Amino acid sequence: MRHRVGHRKLGRITPHRMALLRNLATALFERERIRTTLMKAKELRPYAERLITLARREDDRLHARRLAARALQDRTVMKKLFDDLGARFAARPGGYTRILRLGPRRGDGAEMAIVELIGSEYKPEKKGDEKGKKGAAPSAGKGEGAEKPSGKASRRKTSSKKKAEKAEPEA
C-alpha cells in the first residue's frame, strides 16, 4: 500500500524531476495546453496550480513573485502568469487545470493526456461553416458562376469539357 507517499518519482532523480516539472509548467503557461503522459500530467497539476495560486495573491505580491521565480526561470512566463493568468483566475477558488485522457501512445503504449488551463478550451470550426464562408467571399465580388470548381470530380468534368471543345473545331 502507498500510504503517505507524497508524489510519483517518474523514474528520475530529484533534480531531474524538478527540472521536468519546471519545463512542463513553463510550456503550460506559455501555450495554455500541452500534451504529455498521464503520470507527468498528474504530477504537473498540483505544481502548476500552486504557482497560479501564488499569482492570485494580493497582499504580498513581491514575495509571491520571488517564490514563483524559484519554480519558473523564464521572465516572460512569469509576467504572463502574474499579469494575465492571476487576473483570469482571481475569482476562482481552485481547479485551474484540466486533464483530458487521450488513450495509449502508439509506439510504447504509454497513457497520454492533455493538460490545459481552464478557459482555454479548443473550439474547432465546423467544416460546413468554413466552406460556406470561403465560397461566399470570392463570389460576392465577381458575380455568379465566377467560382472555380475544385476537387477530383470537378477536374474530371472540366477535362472532359476541354476534350469536347477540342473535338468540335476539328469536326
Image (cartoon, rainbow, N blue to C red):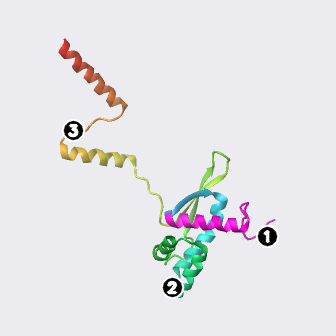
> What residue occupies the far bottom of the structure in this picture?
59
Location of residue 11 (image quadrant): bottom right
Q: Regarding mark 1 in the picture, which secondary structure is present there?
A: loop
Picture coordinates of residue 155, whole percent (x, y): 32, 29
Question: For residue 25, which numbered disc appears in the image?
Answer: none
Q: Is residue 166 left or right of residue 71?
A: left
Determine whether 164 is above or below 68 in the image: above
Residue nearest the viewer, comparing 46 with 95: 46
The residue depicted at 48 percent of the width and 71 percent of the height is: 76
Can you identify the residue that label 1 sits on?
3
Can you identify the residue that label 2 sits on?
58
Q: Regarding mark 2 in the picture, which secondary structure is present there?
A: loop
Give, as a single range, the part of the protein colored magenta. Answer: 1-30
Q: Is residue 29 magenta?
A: yes
Picture coordinates of residue 6, whole percent (x, y): 73, 71
Q: Mark 3, residues whose alpha carbon is within 10 Å: few (<14), some, or many (≥20)?
A: few
Q: Amino acid at mark 2?
A: Glu
The residue depicted at 32 percent of the width and 30 percent of the height is: 154
Picture coordinates of residue 123, whole percent (x, y): 44, 57
Q: CA distance from mark 2 to mark 1?
A: 36 Å
Can you identify the residue that label 3 sits on?
146
The residue depicted at 52 percent of the width and 79 percent of the height is: 56
Q: Regarding mark 3 in the picture, which secondary structure is present there?
A: loop
Residue nearest the viewer, comparing 92 with 69: 69
